[in-house]
Amino acid sequence: MESFFNTFGNIEAIKYVMNSIEDMVFIMKVENDHFKYEYINEATSKVLNYRNHEIRGKIIEEVVPHHISRQLITQYNKVAQTLRPQKFELNYSTKSLELIGEVSLNPILSDDGKCIFIIGIVRDLTERAKQYQELHELKLTLQSKQEQLAFSKQQYEALFLNHPDAMFLMDLEGGFISCNPAAERLAGYSQAELIGNSFTDFLSDTEVDNTVDKFNACIADRKAISYEVDYLDKNQNKLTLLITNIPLLVHDRMEGVFGTARDITEIKRQQEQLAQMAYFDYLTGLSNRRVFDEELAWALDKAVLTNESVALMILDGKEFKKINDSFGHDTGDAVIKEMAKRIQVAVRKTDIVARLGGDEIGVILPDIETKELVENIAERIIKSMHEPLHFNNARILFGMTIGIAIFPTHARQRNDLIKFADEALYHAKRNGFDYSFYNKS
């Protein structure tokens, strides 16, 4: 665990997020050609009957049966090599466990762009797959269109009315023929309001074209198709739905489309939280070092093409260790958060502010026309720190020192620009200045 959390921050906060997710979550460390378990959440422990200390440090081959580990390693290698997420379906079959899972693998990159961790999220589709199979088998036993649209009461109630997912039946034009109570609850509309109307009547303009394309593909290809849709229910609540369209065939003749909808809004939010760990600082919400490096490289590339200047500021808190020692780390964290807020207010909207570590913050100022503009921004930042912070019944005085280097005046290479801004910072600290520009002499 330490290596992952040393990279991405607060252990308890991230563990809380992981364990609040109903899906299984794995954090895997990438070491050469092996993938080692770093952490599994509580949902994973319950399903696989492993505890973190039992699995941590083991490679996939030591935990998963050979016929499954080969498939998993292939997918993990794709993520590590392409640096792109992968999604696939996994049939996990052992003597003690039968699981059908939708697997999402997401790379976590180091500052130099290498894949160092992979976060896996597995959504258990076993029960739903069984229910779909039961519905499919039931459909095959029906002999006529009338029978297809009027299931026997007992089977209809068991598999349609009482299903937790929203279910609905549509004609070939997309008009609703029937729906279950879960569909009414999800949509916010009654069955009477839905039946007879097209599904397009309930979608925003931005979602209609894609959804119609998926619906038509289901009919043309005669295959089930799943996709995500952003949806506003009747009460204007914004939801993300996982839609599945299934062709309804009778004697090889297309008679309609059966559909399901599942609310995955919370799952998407949790996935975004996990992804955010790779790009944003957990304490301040600022961009992290990885984003800072990417934005600086982009700003410098653009400046070369447009013949513009870019200023780089490296900021460091004054006597920050003294604040931590005197008032505690909670107060130190509060000071860092307050500094981040004030810096964002003091700079321009086009400037990039990132936390580089501890109380060190970097600011990228693109499109700089004059040195005076940089000085004005530096002075606004310094002035913004004059007001004390009141925290835990204490009055905290704090400030910042700034080192500045300008491209291409001081340096033409990214690493040199960072180095010179650091040197300017140390020069300012040694001489008691609020800020200092790099000086070659």
Image: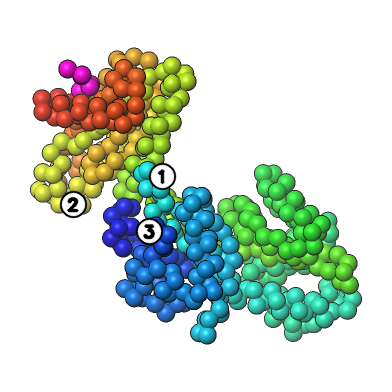
* Residue 214 vertical position relative to residue 170 in the rendered view, above or below: above
Q: Quadrant of the N terminus?
A: bottom left
Residue 32 image offset from top left, x and y in percent? 39, 57
In this view, the residue in front, 158 or 268, is: 268
- Judged by depth in the image, the label closer to the viewer, 3 or 1, is 3
Residue 76 image offset from top left, x and y in percent? 49, 60
Q: Earlier in the sequence, mark 2 or mark 1?
A: 1
Residue 394 image offset from top left, x and y in percent? 14, 46
> Label 3's element?
strand
* Residue 291 vertical position relative to residue 154 in the rendered view, above or below: above
Amino acid type, label 2: His
Residue 296 image offset from top left, x and y in percent? 38, 32
Residue 5 visible from this viewpoint? yes
User: What residue range appears in magenta?
Assistant: 436-441
Q: Circle 3 is placed at which residue position?
A: 31
Residue that appears at 19% across and 48% down: 331
Circle 2 packing at 10 Å, graded few (<14), some (14-19), many (20+), is few
Residue that appears at 65% across and 77% down: 130
